[in-house]
Image (cartoon, grey):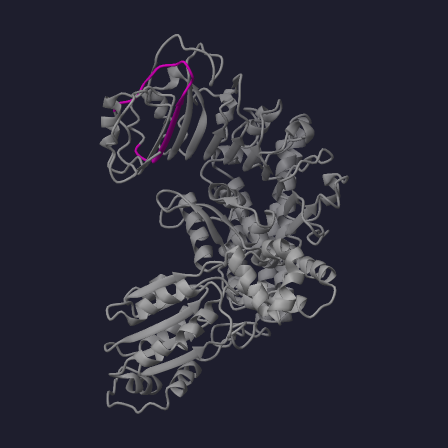
């Protein structure tokens, strides 16, 4: 996809040339001239930086072009051809630029001449990229007159013209939903707008239909009307005409409104001074609501019931509303629905018991999937054989209408499209840690800071918007409502992977089929490479696209990592690096590295990657390993998470970018002057040990550990302190006033300590593990929770 390629190239230019802090002089001598000195002194030649800035500007123009023509769903073969040209240009340009940068940085053994040559080649590569971008823009401008413009006034979104209830006579497991909504409908002080929200196929229309047709609803509303909005675009006047036609049998009242159009005025007249219920089914565009809202009179008892995948609360800011999120069916409800579709139920249902668990697992409680599977199985004789066919189709392509999902996907802005497609790198039905996902998005260059927000905050807003559009599911939330884990429904995941692999963006290597292959076999397959096991080999697509991100979700001793332009490398926590040969010495573009244990060459890897943002080493245990101070060398380091096996001394410089830190520290470093090295830290997790203690979890301390106050860490909202067994620690008397979560382990807390903690007005969670040795104590923390 061109959007992914452009985003990646722009991110590379910003990090390597346009950021305020350049690469350090790690491989460059003091008397050296050329590109690196230009980067260091920030007094570059006009030609070099002029080319970079010009290239970046033209990439922005190309991005705007794609936004203009793709937002509405594409403009036919001409637009697709133009997108392919943009994609191919961006992929080729980034490959050449990064390879030349790498050649320059690694040209340390060939002397000044080799480095000068590499600098000139990089210079030439940038010139060619800028020239090619200019030519591409000129060509697009020439062809633009011949390409039919795609805008809101004529865009056609693919999909069926009507969102249908998949089984009008059957509704399973929705009685509580109906009761809740009915209560709001009949409450005289209830909300005017009731929105039924959820992903496609979850049963929104069926629920709304059952409410609409209920006798109590017909009795309580003088006017009832149902409008199903087509997935294709239709003119605004047509929507109003449809609404007027549905209430044309009602005698109009004299209530002319000069500020309304003639159509709006007629609708207003027919609804004035009457109680009414209007159902807007399949509301995919909130601008349609803003059009209709103006012609709806208020007063008497009026309600608008909406079914939608995307409820934009900003569009309803001036009206009382209730948002009802649809849940998936539980296993019993799912099987009841499955059996109800079979005909007749008594003779058919027992035949399917053998595949019950598999059907429930693959359908994941989505009613439309359950209905489709049941209908197909009810028509066959060999149930097991037919189920295997359906299962393969479910896992590889999905059996939901792709056009319907496209209606939700196409209107996404480019940055959300890229973030959405990125979910394809994770195995299907995988629960994804939000903090990891956000850091990966940032490392990939998907996130741009707006309104002075931190990158992590901006990325979280991206995540929330994807959830609001019913494209992602919340799995777990923290004490303050923040999303901790999320996932993508398997039906949506199939669509996501299909879109990502079309252009060679994603390749998921099936380890069941390719367990003996070297990673070299896939080295030119895609931008994002996932190594994991799945049921059917449908993701692999070979092409000419150098990978930038590799994810190991399963251990494979035959695979290694030789790719020098890699920016993201992730090993699942279950993988032993002793069985995954590594060759990381030449990597100079890493931004995100997550591994399970420290290894000998990792010091060089960290030192040579100034743009490294996240480093995770997850091993834990004893005895402790003292890591080198070079771990602090990356200038862009934002997150450093080390298991309780690793001790690290504080940095010699201030780390302003650091947002989170987790590591073992010695007692002598629990001082204010050390805390001052991390002025913007938000999450701090420390395992404390005495200087003479050989293990963070065992042994005894010769001296008590005294903790300085943390009050100067103004932005800290989560703090975790664990004390070595046998050690005695004196807790601080001052904590950051905005602290929201505090965890203490192994501390011998006094009543005074609890009194101090009780003064923290923002504290919501207090977790104590072997921290209080009294026999009885009373909670003095109010408004939060204690574990």
The question of residue 319 being in magenta is answered with no
Image-based side of 725 in relation to 554, left or right: left
Q: Nearer the viewer, residue 166 or 561?
A: 166
Image spot of residue 376 (x, y percent):
66, 68
Q: Nearer the viewer, residue 521 or 86?
A: 521
Give the residue displayed 54% in from the left and 49% down from the top: 10
247 up-or-down from 228: above or below: below
Q: Nearer the viewer, residue 102 or 429?
A: 429
Image-based side of 764 in relation to 726, left or right: left
- Taking the image as drawn, is residue 715 in sight? yes
Name the residue furthest right.
516
Quadrant occupied by the N terminus: bottom right
Image-based side of 182 in relation to 522, left or right: left
Image spot of residue 543 (x, y percent):
72, 52
Image spot of residue 599 (x, y percent):
61, 24
Quadrant occupied by the C terminus: top left
740 up-or-down from 88: above or below: above
Q: Which residues are magenta?
A: 714-733
369 up-or-down from 582: above or below: below
In terms of secondary structure, what is the magenta stretch mainly? loop
């Amino acid at each position: 996809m061109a959007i992914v390629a452009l985003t990646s190239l722009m991110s590379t230019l910003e990090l390597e040339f346009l950021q305020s802090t350049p690469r350090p002089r790690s491989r460059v001598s003091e008397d050296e001239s050329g590109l690196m000195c230009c980067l260091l002194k920030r007094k570059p030649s006009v030609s070099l930086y002029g080319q970079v800035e010009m290239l970046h500007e033209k990439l922005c123009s190309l991005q705007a072009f794609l936004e203009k023509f793709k937002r509405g769903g594409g403009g036919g073969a001409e637009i697709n051809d133009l997108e392919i040209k943009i994609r191919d240009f961006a992929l080729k340009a980034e490959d050449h630029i990064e390879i030349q940068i790498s050649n320059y940085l690694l040209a340390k053994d060939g002397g000044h001449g080799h480095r000068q040559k590499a600098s000139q080649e990089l210079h030439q590569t940038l010139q060619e990229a800028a020239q090619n971008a200019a030519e591409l823009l000129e060509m697009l401008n020439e062809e633009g007159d011949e390409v039919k413009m795609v805008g809101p006034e004529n865009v056609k979104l693919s999909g069926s013209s009507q969102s249908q209830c998949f089984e009008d006579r059957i509704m399973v497991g929705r009685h509580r939903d109906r009761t809740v909504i009915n209560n709001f409908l009949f409450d005289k002080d209830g909300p005017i707008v009731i929105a039924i929200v959820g992903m496609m196929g979850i049963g929104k229309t069926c629920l709304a239909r059952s409410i609409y047709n209920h006798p109590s609803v017909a009795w309580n509303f003088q006017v009832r009307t149902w409008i199903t909005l087509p997935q294709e675009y239709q003119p605004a006047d047509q929507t109003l005409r449809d609404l007027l036609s549905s209430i044309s049998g009602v005698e109009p009242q004299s209530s002319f409104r000069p500020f309304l159009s003639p159509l709006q005025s007629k609708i207003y007249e027919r609804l004035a001074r009457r109680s009414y219920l209007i159902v807007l089914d399949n509301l995919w565009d909130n601008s349609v609501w803003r059009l209709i809202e103006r012609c709806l009179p208020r007063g008497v008892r009026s309600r608008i019931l909406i079914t939608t995948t995307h409820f934009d609360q900003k569009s309803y800011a001036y009206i009382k509303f209730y948002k009802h999120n649809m849940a998936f069916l539980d296993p019993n409800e799912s099987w009841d629905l499955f059996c109800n579709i079979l005909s007749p139920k008594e003779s058919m249902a027992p035949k399917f018991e053998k595949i019950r668990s598999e059907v429930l697992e693959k359908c994941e409680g989505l009613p439309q999937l359950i209905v489709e599977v049941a209908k197909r199985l009810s028509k066959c004789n060999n149930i097991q054989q037919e189920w295997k066919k359906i299962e393969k189709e479910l896992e590889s392509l999905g059996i939901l209408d792709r056009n319907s999902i496209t209606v939700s996907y196409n209107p996404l802005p480019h940055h959300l499209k890229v973030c959405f497609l990125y979910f394809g790198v994770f195995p299907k039905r995988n629960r994804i840690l939000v903090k990891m996902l956000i850091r990966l998005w940032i490392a990939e260059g998907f996130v741009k800071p707006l309104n002075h927000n931190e990158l992590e905050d901006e990325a979280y807003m991206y995540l929330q918007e994807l959830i609001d559009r019913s494209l992602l599911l919340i799995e777990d939330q923290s004490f303050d409502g923040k999303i901790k884990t999320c996932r993508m429904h398997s039906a949506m995941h199939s669509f996501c992977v299909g879109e990502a692999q079309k252009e060679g963006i994603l390749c998921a290597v099936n380890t069941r089929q390719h367990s003996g292959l070297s990673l070299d076999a896939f080295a030119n397959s895609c931008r994002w490479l996932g190594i994991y096991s799945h049921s059917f080999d449908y993701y692999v697509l070979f092409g000419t696209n150098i990978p930038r991100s590799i994810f190991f979700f399963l251990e494979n001793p035959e695979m290694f990592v030789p790719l020098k332009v890699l920016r993201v490398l992730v090993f699942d926590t279950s993988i032993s690096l002793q069985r995954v040969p590594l060759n990381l010495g030449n990597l100079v573009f890493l931004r995100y590295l997550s591994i399970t244990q420290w290894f000998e060459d990792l010091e060089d890897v960290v030192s040579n990657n100034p743009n490294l943002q996240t480093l995770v080493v997850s091993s834990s245990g004893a005895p402790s390993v003292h890591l080198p101070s070079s771990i602090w060398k990356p200038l862009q380091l934002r997150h450093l998470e080390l298991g309780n096996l690793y001790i690290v001394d504080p940095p010699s410089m201030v780390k302003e970018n650091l947002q989170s830190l987790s590591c073992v520290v010695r007692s002598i470093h629990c001082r204010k002057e050390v805390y001052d090295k991390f002025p913007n830290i938000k999450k701090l997790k420390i395992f404390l040990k005495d200087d003479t203690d050989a293990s963070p979890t065992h042994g005894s301390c010769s001296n008590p550990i005294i903790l300085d106050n943390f009050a100067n860490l103004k932005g800290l909202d989560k703090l975790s302190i664990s004390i070595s067994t046998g050690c005695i620690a004196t807790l601080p008397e001052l904590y950051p006033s905005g602290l929201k979560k505090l965890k203490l382990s192994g501390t011998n807390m006094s009543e005074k300590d609890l009194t101090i903690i009780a003064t923290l007005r923002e504290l919501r969670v207090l977790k104590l593990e072997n921290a209080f040795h009294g026999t009885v104590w009373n909670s003095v923390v109010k408004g939060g929770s204690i574990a």
